[in-house]
Amino acid sequence: MATLFKPLQVEERHQNAPRLSVIVPTYNEFANIAPLVAAVRSVLGSVPWEMIVVDDDSRDGTYDEVLRIAQSEPRLRCLRRVGRRGPSSAVTEGVLAANGEVIAVMDADFQHDETKLPVMYHRLIEEEADVVVGTRYAGEGGIGDWNATRAKMSNFANTLSRRLVGNQTTDPVSGFFVIRRSVFVSTLYGLSQQGYKILIDLLTSADRPLKVLEEPYQFRSRAEGESKISMMVLAEFAFLLIDKVTRGWIPPRFVLFVGVGGLGLLIHLCILLTGAKANLGFLDAQVLATFTAMVFNYVVNNEFTYRDRRLVGWKFIRGLVLFMLICSIGALANVGVAELAIQRTHSWTAAGILGALMGAVFNFGAASSIVWGQ
Ligand code: GDD
Ligand code: MN
């Protein structure tokens, strides 16, 4: 009878419970999933692991592929998100669903060297670190066969980010790292979760200095599929930096919107002056300038500020019409507020700024909810 009370089962369960949760954000990675699971299984050997693929409703059947493989690999799960995009928030949600005390974050496309996973995992535990960052910029690390432009872009992002996170790591934009779950979770409320750069976000949100180790690796070229790095990634990187610099007080999208508006204003003035030189009447030049500036603002906002909700096809045209309507109402709001302000302050500058601010806030609110509303 005594054997009944032996904590055998408990011990067994404990030993099999995942200690390492590998979080993989995916978008259109169908062809990489099966080889990735096989590779992770083989390198992790006796480490109790699980893998959570966080898929943003890929068009290529990534989700079904994960379910199919999970039939014979119960350590694999898929978290499918609908109507959402972005690796950072995907990773965070994966971490929140993870069972392991240690988290590994890596891409699905084999650019990150999975053979480093067990090394990073063991170093984290044995050297009592908070984070082990896979780095391309130290020791034997390298950026592989990137072309010069991409290498320069990466270098630029890297330098900028290092200024933000200090000397904690040589590769703060790395998407490959191992971290204690408790450390990740402790930063949750400070995370901005914009875009790709979850590591910068984590390192700048921690409430105590973290012990960060580095493990150099060679960045490989993508196995299957295409990179999603694009204007969207640049925009999101700008979002993250703005969010960190303003400490979350001003929506990054608003800052970009106003920035684009400022450029539009410059264009407006240039056309007006050119019109004056070309002997166009003021009204004609003003109409032309206003129209061009609005189209410019719309196109740039569509490509950059609202990249994640970019309008194409007939929706692009509909959006343009709506945007122009909104800007016209915004201009009325601008003039109305300025008029009220001038009566009280008698300062042209103050009234002008207040009016412009009112117009910008109105345009931003209306454009965000009506033109690029989801
Ligand atoms: N869930 C989700 N949602 N995953 C996404 C999304 C998205 O919107 N966009 C991309 N991913 C996934 C991809 O499927 C891939 O697994 C991983 O995020 C990286 O995307 P890539 O498009 O392959 O990025 P990259 O190779 O240009 O850049 C990567 O490596 C750099 C070096 O470590 C990223 O991890 C960068 O953050 C990193 O700096
Ligand atoms: Mn990649």
Image: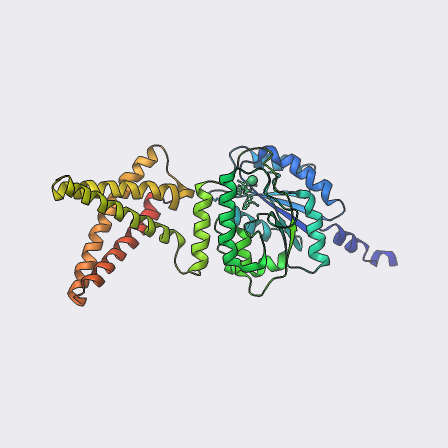
Q: Can residue 19 be seen by looking at this rendering?
A: no
Place of residue 240 in the rendered image (x, y in percent of width and height, measured from the top left): 46, 53
Quick check: 139 above or below 291? below
| Quadrant observed for ligand 2 in the rendered image | top right
| Quadrant hosting residue 188 | bottom right
Which residue: 17% across, 63% down? 342
Q: For the N terminus, which image quadrant?
A: bottom right
- Judge from the rendering whether residue 99 lies leftward or rightward of residue 274; answer left or right: right
Where 24 sits versus 312, above or below? below
- Residue at x 77% of width, y 55% of height: 10
Above-or-below relation of 210 to 277: below
Q: Nearer the viewer, residue 302 or 154?
A: 154
Q: Residue 183: name its quadrant.
A: bottom right
Q: Position of residue 280 (x, y in %)?
A: 13, 39
Q: Is residue 168 left or right of residue 75?
A: left
Instruction: Name the spot of residue 221 as percent of width and height, x first.
Output: 59, 37
Q: Quadrant of residue 186?
A: bottom right
The residue shown at (67%, 39%) is 37
Q: Confirm whether residue 258 shows in the render.
A: yes
